[in-house]
Amino acid sequence: MTIKVPAPFAGISDLGFTAQYRAQHFNEPQRDVPLLFEGPAPPVERLAEVLQLLSGSRSRSYAWTDPVLLGDGVVILAYRDRSVSGHTLAEGARIADYVLNLVRPVVFTFLQDCAAIAHLRLSDVIEMRVSAERKSVAELSLPLEDIVRPNGERLLWGIA
């Protein structure tokens, strides 16, 4: 499954990202979910620097990898489920965290962390296109308040 978010950052309409979920068996721990960001080189480079804040944050149920700048206008970051780290579900892993990480799209977690941890200002409306096996599944436009409260105050294009 793939979720495309074309312009999530306020003031920059040509920088977006894609989250890619790989197929896996139901009972195995969630695999890392890579997020691939593409756009003009200067804002993507600034974004790569800001995303370091996410990789340094601590959550008991998930983590972000260090962002990697792949070239002009491309950076990658991955979401890593930690809810069952070192435990199986039968051994007392945090089942509520595991289920939440499994069913909540990584896109929402990423946007919440961008606003709360990196203080990035997000677009007022977040568009998403969900597809699976090259077929469109859904297209959504959600008001930001349905995903994140409060919004960040730092504009990506204004970060030096």
Image (cartoon, rainbow, N blue to C red):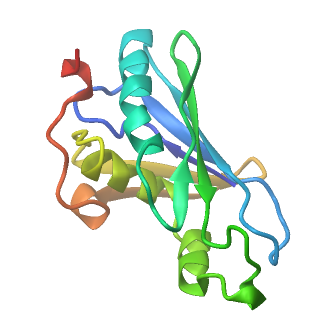
Q: Quadrant of the C terminus?
A: top left
Residue 47 image offset from top left, x and y in percent: 39, 26
Left or right of 135 in this view: 143: left
In percent of width and height, residue 11 lies at: 22, 28
Q: Along the line of sight, which residue is nearer the eye, 146 or 27? A: 27
Q: Quadrant of residue 30?
A: bottom right
Q: Is residue 89 left or right of residue 74?
A: right
* Residue extending farthest right: 25
- The quadrant the N terminus occupies is bottom right
Answer yes or no: is residue 14 visible: no
**Image point (77%, 80%), residue name:** 88
Residue 15, compared with residue 95, is above or below; it is: above
Q: Nearer the viewer, residue 14 or 57?
A: 57
- The residue lying at 53 percent from left, 76 percent from top is 100
- The percent position of residue 120, horizontal first and vertical second, equals 25, 39
Where residue 94 appears, as percent x and y from the top left, is 59, 82
Q: Residue at x 44, y 11 (%)?
A: 41
